[in-house]
Amino acid sequence: MNVYHGSYIEIDKIDLSKCEPRKDFGQGFYVTNIRKQAEVWAERIGAKHNTKGVVTEFVFYENAFIDGVHKVLRFDNYTEEWLDFVVLNRRKDSPSLAHDYDIIEGPVADDRISENITKYVNGKISREKFFKMLRREEEPTHQICFCTADSLLMLERKDNRLDIKYEVSEIGEPLIKQLILDKNIDETTATDIFYSSNTFTQLADESTKFYLKPWQEIYELLKQEISNNK
């Protein structure tokens, strides 16, 4: 999935310690799959720093949602659970990260919604009225928050992707086929084993240079990992 981050500068390296605390999903690096939304963010924050703003494009490896390695929370819409979670993270007495999730996806509490959240927290409007007012929102919003160093391995700046001999998905194909043969299992089970393995995590991290290894060598490491986990 292509995702976008709007800022006043181009993002070369992500430093979670520099990310603002007490945002919707806590302190973390935020992106969206809606480019227009990122452009608006870039324009607004750029104006504060006397720049035009910059949108940096990334590739997000969506298998992080199901790999079993990362702890994920996803909100499909503005729900009561979403509201409670945003309130938790925005509370002034909450820590910068009030949860232990790696990746969180859901809609955005924009300026208008944020104002109503403040009214709700201060007891000026009821929960019922908050959601009634929320129904007036028309524009769809989207954000993904990467909260931990491990989660950032699933995010890669698009124009910085290396010209490597094999893409991760291409390397994974023979690994999965070999797993099916060796373990006498179906494709779904083999795929789950591969994508939830530490071997895959290292393969997806270009800094490890795993992608330069022959797939047969990577498969031996995967077999060893599976054996150690029994």
Image (tube, rainbow, N blue to C red):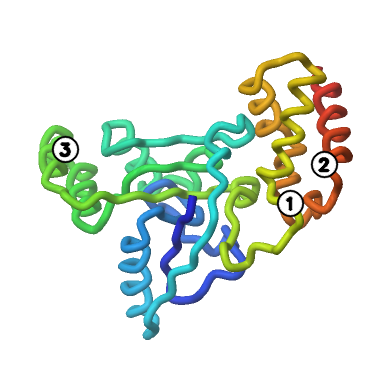
Query: Which residue, given by chain and number where applicable, does mark 1 sit on?
Result: 166
The amino acid marked with disc number 3 is Phe
Question: Is 198 positioned to the left or the right of 115 in the image?
Answer: right
The amino acid marked with disc number 1 is Tyr
Residue 1: assigned label = none
Instruction: Please report the residue visible at 29 percent of the width from the left and 37 percent of the height from the top.
Output: 77
Nearer to us: label 3 or label 2: 2
**Label 2 SS:** helix
* Outermost residue to the top: 184
Depth check: give the residue in front, 229 or 99: 229
Q: Are marks 1 and 2 in contact (CB under 8 Å)?
A: yes
Question: What's the CA distance linking mark 3 and mark 2?
Answer: 52 Å
Question: Is 57 positioned to the left or the right of 177 in the image?
Answer: left
Question: What's the CA distance linking mark 1 and mark 2?
Answer: 9 Å
* Residue 99 image offset from top left, x and y in percent: 50, 38
Q: Quadrant of residue 190?
A: top right
Q: Is residue 103 above or below residue 205?
A: above
Query: Which residue, given by chain and number where applicable, does mark 3 sit on?
Result: 131
The amino acid marked with disc number 2 is Trp
